Amino acid sequence: MDKRTLLHFSNDVVDTFSRYIQAKDSDCEAGGLILGSVHGQNMLIKEVTEPTINDKRFRCLFERMPFGHEAMALAKWTTSKGVTRYLGEWHTHPEDDPSPSTLDRAEWKSLAEKRIDKRPLLVVIVGRKSLYVELVQSNGKGSVLVPIS
Ligand SMILES: [Zn+2]
């Protein structure tokens, strides 16, 4: 458990997450990029990108296509003069209290390895009742974050 990192999710982000909760059996997974600012060890999560028509959305799989998400991340980065940046990835799971799949782990590790700034990758899984939040290091090791409020 990591007690040194604090995360704050903006109301907009919480609203977006709630809109994609897989409440019905027919709901597909959703996901996107997490954008925000870094303050030492802490992070302010300001915005998340939403699924585009190019993304592949299924009941138990979400495959994000770069187009759309990356353009938005770049636009936010430019307009905020580099303050709002890419922090990581989010997606939904059709589970009450979600946990990462083997595929999730493999993908997170490769994304963390690719980061130029060597910062850990923030990953969020939006379940039906709770969020799963983890910071993944480039060696694939992660620390799970727990809610404090
Ligand atoms: Zn997953």
Image (cartoon, rainbow, N blue to C red):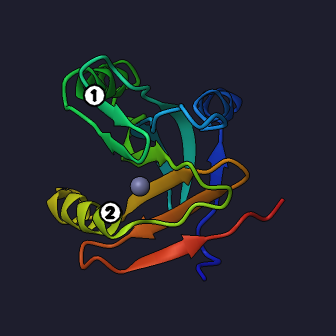
Residue 55: x, y in percent? 28, 28
The answer, for residue 41, to whether it is visible in the render is: no
Amino acid bearing label 1: Asp
- Count of numbered circles in the view: 2
The answer, for residue 27, to whether it is visible in the render is: yes
* Front position in the image: 51 or 123: 51
The residue located at (79%, 65%) in the rendering is: 148
Q: Tag 1, which secondary structure?
A: loop
Judge whether 17 appears above or below 114 on screen.
Answer: above
Q: Tag 2, which secondary structure?
A: loop
User: Which is more N-terminal, label 2 or label 1?
Assistant: 1
Name the quarter showing ligand 1. bottom left
Residue 12: x, y in percent? 65, 26
Badge number at residue 130: none
9 on left or right of 29: right
Badge number at residue 55: 1
Judge whether 147 appears above or below 130 on screen.
Answer: below
Residue 4 occupies which quadrant of the picture?
Answer: bottom right
Amino acid bearing label 2: Arg
Judge whether 110 appears above or below 31 on screen.
Answer: below
Instruction: Decide: few, some or many residues near mark 2? Use Cα within 10 Å; few <14, some 14-19, many ≥20.
Output: some
Residue 6: x, y in percent? 64, 62
Question: Rounded to the nearest whole Å, what is the CA distance between mark 1 and mark 2?
Answer: 26 Å
* Front position in the image: 116 or 148: 148
Badge nearest the viewer, 1 or 2 = 1
Badge number at residue 119: 2
Residue 104 occupies which quadrant of the picture?
Answer: bottom left
| Quarter of the N terminus within the rendering | bottom right
The residue located at (84%, 59%) in the rendering is: 149
